[in-house]
Image (tube, rainbow, N blue to C red):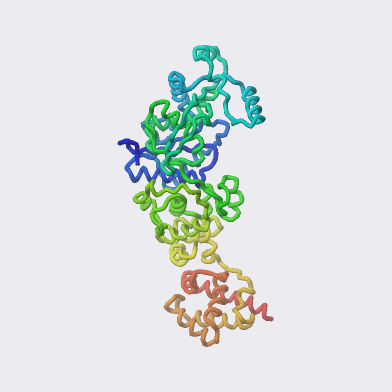
Amino acid sequence: MKPSNQPIRVRFAPSPTGRLHLGGARTALYDYLLARQMGGKFILRIEDIDLKRFVPGAEEELMQGLRWLGLEWDEGPDIGGSCGPYRQSERKEIYLDHAQQLIARDKAYYCFCTPERLSKVRQEQQRSKSPQKYDGTCRKLDPVEAAKRVAAGEPHVIRFKTPKEGSITVRDHLRGDITVENRSIDDYILIRSDGFALYHLAAMVDDHLMDISHVIRGSEWLSTFPLHAHIVRAFGWQEPVWVHLSIFLKPSGKGKMSKRESAELIKDGYSIFVNDLEGLGYIPEAVVNWIALMGWSYDDHTEMFSLDDMIEKFSLERLNPAPAAINFTKFDHFNGLHIRNLSTQDLCKRVLPFFKSAGYQVDEKILLEIIPIIQQRITTLDDAPVVGGFFFEDTVHPKTEELIGAKMTAKESADALQVAYDLLSKLPVINIDTAEIPLRVLADQLHLKAGQFFGILRVAVTGRTVSPPLIESMAIIGKEKVLERIIYGIKMLEKMAT
């Protein structure tokens, strides 16, 4: 759906007042998918006119996060385009000019009320339990007199002159028509006393001048949606398709997810901030798959999508306005699925930094051998050194009690390891073909279950009670090191037995 025959042009317009979170990433993703599917343009616009909340470095982190997710833009502050500048702080005169146009059309007015007066008005409204909004004092000023006061340098703002009669009906693509009585809408400030525009004017002007066909944004803007439509209509512009997305709820489903919860989440290895996810071992393919399905579905059973799949299948008609609880268990599920979908070489490249960060000196040739036997066993990339770090350890130091087989004594376990050592030491190499059947036969001869016998061997060789397939692991570790580790395990058990 698009207005008339207008080309598809969408924008992601974050404020550099904080970090890129999941909600913002989902908005950017939907913008990107629609643009790519329809052969349109995806525009990055930085809404940086709230100077008090500006965070240095936030713009760079936003861009880094989008690129990590694979969401490249066609126009933006770093690459330019035909509708720039793409930072609102560089468009101040454009907004002032449009505010003046509204004044000339009797759709806006100068307001000279001081902060002190406005505070008194609010206090009186609170006492009388009246709606909290501007009382319209300067709305009644003669325009010529107001212009003289402005020319004389008197401090002022510019307010929108909201109609006080009738109602306005606005259409959200997900919710349908929304009708609001005009008298309930405030005369919002469009231009502050410092000459900078507020979002209400700046975003509407930019969307028009940048030929935006669809405005996809969070549902927090629904409350001022009628105002924004009023501004657009005051200029006589064609409205874009408005799409207000569902909110994200906490994992419990109770209450809106907020940035404040991130400190607690990080303790459990999760975050709502995109740039944290890479360090936590998540991959961008899983992130976009996961967030896409928190508000959109293709059908009632397909859940795994690549970015190309989503470009092909995405539809605004399949968006759901209902709140979506953030489900990190589902996130882990998607991450595991997408990890298992990677090639050996690709996964090797992605897990290498995590092995190095864990302190391992990694032989990449060996790592390539390891990938096929750990790929099914990791959920996040940082699981890889936990699951496979023993391959790069000179020695392992298992807990003695874990070396003792189920329903066995330390001496019985040591004896079993010794017999295994004797068998393995006689093999030319240790691999599936040479070792698996002989070891299983040996377990039968010792009247042990395979699980008991292989469990003792696993702990001795890997230092862990759970590991990738044992014999494949021993083949990669190599015969010499395997035998050294078994001898060490025997000594530990014998020491306990005495």
In depth, the one of 328 and 173 nearer the eye is 173
Residue 484, how many percent across, how many down?
56, 74
Q: Image height check: is 65 above or below 4?
A: below
Q: Would residue 41 be found to the left or right of residue 196 on screen? A: left
Residue for point 49% across, 57% down: 330
Q: Image height check: is 278 above or below 101?
A: below
Q: Image height check: is 30 above or below 13?
A: below
Residue for point 42% across, 26% down: 234
Residue for point 41% across, 28% down: 233
Residue for point 46% across, 76% down: 430
Which of the image's four quarters has the N terminus?
top left
Residue 31 in which image quadrant: top left
Which of the image's four quarters has the C terminus?
bottom right
In depth, the one of 346 and 239 nearer the eye is 239
Is residue 148 in view from this perspective? Answer: yes
Tally the numbered discs: 0
